[in-house]
Image (cartoon, rainbow, N blue to C red):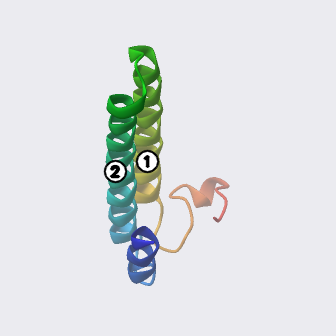
Amino acid sequence: MVSVLLIDSTAEVEGNGRLAVTLFFCFFLTGIFDFLISLTVFILFVPFPFVFSFLFTICLGVGGVSFRTFIFLAREGKDGWYEDSERGGTKL
């Protein structure tokens, strides 16, 4: 819910730099919360370390996807076109 409000509050800003930063931090915080939830589940309910390793790997994957999303949005043009739109890029 907080992520949606943050994204909505920056969506109308000219250019996508601020939106990209907002999305990055939202995804980053989501990854941290996923890690903390996994750690709590491991400590309270799971006696096997390999399950924690599996959950931690999933959290790292979420972080990687969010970072790639941040890079993609940061490189995107302010009007919604890719930087290489003159070479046949597509509009989002």
Residue 26 sits above or below residue 64 on the image: below
Q: Quadrant of residue 19?
A: bottom left
Q: Residue at x 42, y 36 (%)?
A: 59
Q: Say which mark, if any, is on residue 4.
A: none
Q: Quadrant of residue 41?
A: top left
Amino acid residing under circle 1: Ser
Q: Which residue is mark 1?
A: 66
Q: Nearer the viewer, residue 23 or 78?
A: 23
Q: Residue at x 44, y 27 (%)?
A: 57
x and y percentages locating residue 62 in the rendered image = 46, 41
Q: Which quadrant of the figure contains the C terminus? A: bottom right
Q: Say which mark, if any, is on residue 28.
A: 2
Foreground mark, 2 or 1?
A: 2
Are discs 2 and 1 less than 8 Å apart at CB?
yes
Q: Residue at x 45, y 29 (%)?
A: 55
Q: Secondary structure at mark 1?
A: helix
